[in-house]
Image: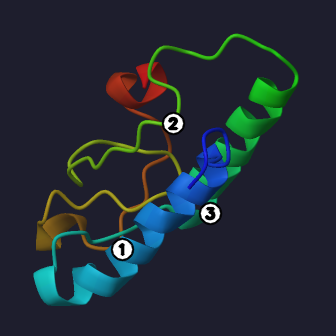
């Protein structure tokens, strides 16, 4: 790829494709927030095009355990007791990410 050709969206899409290829075999991720990741990447691309300063960790993709609350997503801590529970709020670490 030539310099400057990659975007946050294309990089995120590449990671999501790799997850799709490998997760069935690895069974490492219970839930993938693909839509949210792509929207965040598009927002970063828009900000970059507008010349806005990006945060130091802009575009960094991460995985978190399912014992960390993310609003609107399952929070099970790998426990049957919490099966089906959807968090109504974000944990502080998610808010600061």
**Residue at the (20%, 50%) spot, across then down:** 65
Q: Quadrant of residue 21?
A: bottom left
Residue 37 position (above or below residue 25):
above
C-alpha span from label 1 to label 2 = 16 Å
Which image quarter is the N terminus in?
Answer: bottom right
**As drawn, is 42 to the left or to the right of 74?**
right
Please tell me the numbered disc located at residue 35. 3
Q: Earlier in the sequence, mark 1 or mark 2?
A: 1
The residue that label 1 is drawn on is 18
**Residue at the (82%, 16%) spot, across then down:** 51
Crowd tier of the residue under label 2, counting other residues whose Cα lies within 10 Å: few below 14, some 14–19, many 20 or above: some
Residue 88 position (above or below residue 53):
below
C-alpha span from label 1 to label 3 = 15 Å
Residue 28 position (above or below residue 21):
above
Judging from the image, what secondary structure is the residue with disc 3 in?
A: helix
The residue that label 2 is drawn on is 59
**As drawn, is 13 to the left or to the right of 21?**
right
Judging from the image, what secondary structure is the residue with disc 2 in?
A: loop
**As drawn, is 89 to the left or to the right of 42?**
left
Q: Quadrant of residue 35?
A: bottom right
């Amino acid at each position: 790829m030539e310099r400057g050709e990659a975007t946050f969206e294309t990089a995120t899409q590449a990671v999501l494709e790799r997850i799709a290829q490998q997760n069935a075999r690895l069974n490492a991720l219970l839930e993938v927030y693909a839509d949210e990741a792509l929207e965040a990447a598009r927002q970063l691309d828009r900000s970059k095009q507008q010349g806005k300063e990006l945060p130091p960790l802009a575009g960094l993709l991460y995985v978190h355990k399912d014992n960390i609350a993310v609003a609107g997503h399952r929070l099970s801590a790998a426990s049957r007791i919490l099966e089906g529970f959807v968090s109504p709020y974000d944990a502080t670490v998610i808010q600061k990410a």
